[in-house]
Amino acid sequence: MGRRTGPRLSPALIGGLVGAVALALAPIARADWMLFGGAEKVFDGEYAAMTALLPFSEQLGRGFVHRYGASYIRYEYPEGDDTVQGETRAIAASLGYQVPVTDGWFGIYTGAAYRDTTFDPRQPDNRQEGRRVVPTVDIDGGLLAANRWLFAGVASYTPGDRAYWTRARALRRVSARIFVGPEIVAHGDRDYDARQTGLAAQFNRVIGPFDIVLKAGGKRIRNGDSGAYGGIEVLRHFQ
């Protein structure tokens, strides 16, 4: 099968993007707004995103919030004797509510995303192909237990496509500002399913005001190949 070249993520973009899901790892924020993002390179593709989270009141951490994001993803999955390459660019906006939790956080968000998805070879029976507006639901939460363990989870779901992305981490404090532990990721849709297991290291404010997560591990596609992944996430509070 001929592969479509498509845009590739340069090292400068990967290094400069600030972090997509790092909210699920950060202690509850007491800031006027937050910018988080990240990038990930996988044996069969790549991912990058950036999101801004803003409160309606004076502080994040309790009450209603609004958030805006942009993302890019490239991935592959087996289809018969072929390998299909998918590519999606998206922008999204949502409203949410954050519940104050002692030594933790919990938030739920609902909104819509505008997605432009292409496949190579084309998949005329795949309803995700093309430009569409789709509803989205996101949940994140976590708990800092005994000031030693940081448990965090995040889930995203697109009902119309049955598309999902979930991640769970259990990180143990190894120093005043560093947590290390395993992570499990599951994501997919009607035509694609994958699982990732790896190790994540979270560094809180070790580079100026930034929290940074480094992660690496292995990925397996349903009825397909397996290989390695690695990535970075960055979180910044603005006051």
Image (cartoon, grey):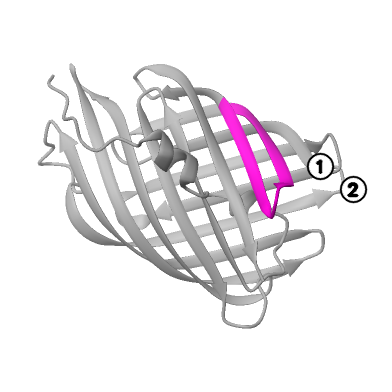
Q: Quick check: 23 above or below 86?
A: below
Query: Which residue appears at 40% of the width and 61% of the height?
Result: 136
- The image position of residue 202, as x and y in percent, is 69, 40
Q: State the quadrant of the C terminus.
A: bottom right
Per the image, label 1 sits on a secondary structure element best described as: strand
The extreme bottom residue here reads 57
* Residue 204 relative to residue 126: left or right: right
Q: Quick check: 210 above or below 110?
A: above
CB under 8 Å between discs 2 and 1: yes
* Residue 14 relative to residue 72: left or right: right
Read off the magenta span. 198-216
Query: Which residue appears at 80% of the width and 43% of the height?
Result: 177
Tally of marks: 2
Q: Name the residue under label 1.
A: 149
Q: Quick check: 75 above or below 104?
A: above
Q: State the quadrant of the N terminus.
A: top left
Query: Which residue appears at 18% of the width and 46% of the height?
Result: 129
* Residue 238 relative to residue 35: left or right: right
181 magenta-colored: no
Query: Which residue appears at 61% of the width and 53% of the height?
Result: 235
Front residue of 94/177: it is: 177
Mark 2 Cα shell of 10 Å, populated few (<14), some (14-19), many (≥20): few
Quadrant for residue 193, please give it: top left
Quadrant for residue 28, please give it: bottom right
Tell me the tag on residue 226: none
Mark 1 Cα shell of 10 Å, populated few (<14), some (14-19), many (≥20): some
| Amino acid identity at mark 1 | Trp
Per the image, label 2 sits on a secondary structure element best described as: loop
Q: Name the residue under label 2.
A: 146
Q: Quick check: 6 above or below 18?
A: above
Q: How far apart are marks 2 and 1 (CA)?
A: 7 Å
